[in-house]
Image: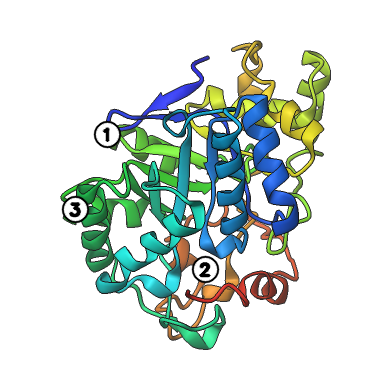
Amino acid sequence: MAESFVLNTGARIPSVGLGTWQIEPEAVCSAVYAAVKAGYRHIDSAVAYRNQKEVGLALKKLFEDGVVKREELFITSKLWPGNHAPEDVEEDICSALEDLQLDYVDLYLIHGPIRIKKGTMFIPENLMRTDIPATWGAMEKLYDSGKARAIGVSNFSCKKVEDLLAIARVPPAVNQVECHSVWQQAKLRKLCQSTGIHLSAYSPLGSPGSPGYCGPSVLSNPIVISLAKKLQKTPAQVALRWGLQMGQSVIPKSANETRIKENFDIFEWFIPEDLMPEFNGIKQVRLLKAEFVVHPQSGYNSLEDLWDGEVEQEAGRAECEEYSDFLRCFSSAVET
């Protein structure tokens, strides 16, 4: 299994990256340092995670200590939803580069088809309708300038990807979405493969315990556990290896050094071809539904509007207390 995938820009994105969402600022520096020492070469960050400056401190220390060179790393950041206006996009990446102490990022993503008023908190009253064509035009200028070596999107459904491709001068290189054995994104994966867009999986372990995630557990799924026992691996390793064999990069999050190393130990073995169909028996449910976006000001009147019908593939939507926890997670991440 290759340790990287080729993007439509010709660059390579590492197969496994470290996710930094939900890692406290005081812990993320150590996590990033440990991950790179363990072999990770992709660090996924965003201003919304409220720890991007600390990620930058870790990168600076890694370079100063000679652990790795800048050109050996693949760094991702994302556009803050309050900076979707074309005139604000360059300011946003310049702020990210300052936080990360870098001259460029390898990948810059529109964090989602979600927009809020500039300079406000992430609460429903501040939601606005997106203008993705205008925002994407500004993203293309970042690509032209070299400040972003590749540009892409996150949390885009099939329809939203198709709509973007219809107007894009520079096609998105990546669509980073929730993807794991409980939400396999078969339709979206097929579309991305056919259009040269790389599918990258955040929350490839289901993000257990994170605010906003609810429904069936990936790591306690009977099929995943059974396969882990057969292969003498952990459920997390099986879940991540499944992603690689499906052709997507994976971005597991952990601040625990042991688990960071364990999550990277997925290259010297594989899930046999005859066992892969067992994943088809897992009920498909989106775990992060983002109900907080359903609001008259956002233009999304239902979850089906937001995800263009891509919510569940079987009846029986899981119930959860997502709304307040999710908002608390992001409410203090204001535009800078």
- Could you say where residue 335 lies in the image, as x and y percent from the top left? 48, 75
x 64%, y 13%: residue: 270
x 40%, y 53%: residue: 109
Q: Secondary structure at mark 2?
A: helix
Q: Nearer the viewer, residue 153 or 290?
A: 153
To which residue does mark 2 refer? 303
Q: Residues within 10 Å of mark 2 (few under 14, many from 20)?
A: some
To which residue does mark 1 refer? 9
Q: Residues within 10 Å of mark 1 (few under 14, many from 20)?
A: some
Q: Nearer the viewer, residue 148 or 265?
A: 148
- Could you say where residue 103 lies in the image, as x and y percent from the top left? 37, 48
Identify the amino acid type marked 1.
Thr
Residue at the farthest bottom position: 125
Mark 3 vs mark 1, CA separation in Å: 18 Å
Q: Residues within 10 Å of mark 3 (few under 14, many from 20)?
A: few
- Judge depth for marks 3 and 1 and give the one in front: 1
- Could you say where residue 288 lies in the image, as x and y percent from the top left? 62, 58
Label whose residue precedes the other's in the sequence (2 or 3): 3
Q: Is residue 281 visible?
A: no
Q: Secondary structure at mark 3?
A: helix
Q: Secondary structure at mark 1?
A: loop
x 73%, y 65%: residue: 319
How many numbered marks have been drawn onto this rendered protein structure?
3
Q: Are marks 1 and 2 in contact (CB under 8 Å)?
A: no
Quadrant of res 290: bottom right
Q: Which mark is residue 166?
A: 3
In the picture provided, is 303 more to the left or to the right than 322? Answer: left
Mark 1 vs mark 2, CA separation in Å: 33 Å
| Residue 288 in the image: above or below residue 239 | below
Identify the amino acid type marked 3.
Ala
